[in-house]
């Protein structure tokens, strides 16, 4: 509060008081209200209220983003979980942060699989597959987004690449340390044995052989019985002659 005292103001005299104010830095637009009161011993008190809109100070801050995946190798037709971790490592709140996530390869996002962690009091909007908007991400705050992807069925092996980036209205665009993206090897399914065979490492050949025997054994037995029946039939014919 500032107080000014004038000993005497003559009839028809005017006084103009000028002073400067320095506003503190703010991150949100606010309204400042100034109240001026004028009172003399021989006059009524007069009150003047002035309102001013104070624009927010735009402060640059810094984001950090990380992308991981649960499985680095899968079979065609399987699902996998991807994880985005975004953190505000700057000194100020990040505004209007857009997260862009892209899948490159023979895969698709699974609808309704998105789960957001550490989102207390955060306004987060899903703009579509792999796109999110965070209205305000406070300083030192992090948010985790999980979602599932399904790798489409195919015969040949392939690689699916996932890339992500984030940018706020007061931040630079950021990428994970692996700028080339997270890569997942998708093993194609070529025959029945591969469809039912789990990943077996070095023992895969042996398991293939065992499964092949199990699958083919009924047809082998039937073939042997058919050959033996044919032989018995030929022997009976020869005896009749």
Image (cartoon, helix red, strand yellow):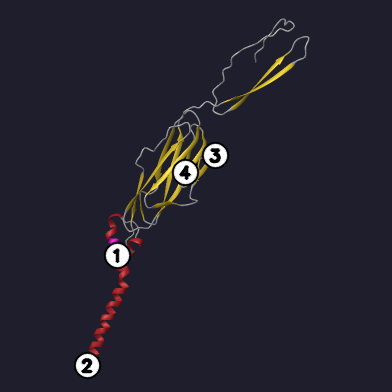
Q: Residues within 10 Å of mark 4 (few under 14, many from 20)?
A: some
What percent of the width, then of the height, locates residue 68? 40, 43
User: Mark 2: which secondary structure?
Assistant: helix
Q: In this rendering, would 241 be left or right of 221? A: left
In the picture of the structure, the residue carrying the numbered disc 2 is: 239
Q: Nearer the viewer, mark 3 or mark 1?
A: 3
- Label 3 vs 1, first from the N-terminus: 3
Give the CA separation, mark 2 to mark 1. 43 Å
Judged from the image, the secondary structure of the residue bearing numbered disc 3 is loop
- Examine the image and state in which quarter residue 29 appears: top right
Above or below, 27 relative to 155:
above
Q: Which residue is mark 4?
A: 131
**Residue 62 painted magenta:** no
For disc 3, the marked residue is: 123
- Tell me the mark number nearer the camera, choosing from 3 and 2: 3
User: Horizontal and vertical percent for residue 52?
Assistant: 62, 23
**Residue at left offset 31%, top offset 74%:** 219
- First of labels 2, 1 by sequence position: 1
């Amino acid at each position: 509060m500032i107080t000014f005292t004038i000993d005497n103001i003559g009839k028809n005299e005017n006084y103009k008081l000028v002073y400067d104010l320095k506003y503190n830095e703010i991150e949100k637009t606010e309204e400042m209200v100034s109240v001026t009161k004028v009172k003399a011993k021989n006059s009524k008190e007069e009150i003047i209220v002035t309102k001013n809109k104070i624009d927010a100070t735009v402060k640059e801050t810094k984001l950090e983003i990380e992308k991981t995946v649960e499985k680095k190798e899968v079979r065609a037709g399987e699902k996998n979980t991807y994880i985005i971790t975004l953190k505000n490592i700057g000194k100020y709140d990040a505004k209007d942060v857009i997260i862009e996530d892209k899948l490159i390869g023979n895969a698709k996002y699974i609808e309704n699989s998105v789960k957001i962690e550490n989102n207390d009091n955060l306004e987060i909007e899903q703009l579509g597959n792999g796109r999110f908007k965070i209205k305000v991400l406070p300083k030192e705050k992090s948010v985790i987004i999980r979602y599932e992807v399904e790798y489409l069925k195919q015969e040949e092996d392939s690689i699916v690449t996932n890339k992500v980036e984030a940018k706020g209205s007061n931040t630079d665009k950021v990428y994970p340390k692996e700028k080339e993206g997270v890569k997942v090897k998708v093993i194609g399914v070529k025959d029945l044995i591969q469809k039912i065979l789990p990943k077996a490492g070095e023992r895969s050949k042996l398991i293939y052989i065992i499964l092949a025997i199990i699958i083919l054994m009924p047809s082998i037995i039937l073939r042997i019985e058919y050959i033996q029946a044919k032989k018995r039939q030929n022997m009976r014919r020869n005896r009749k002659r």
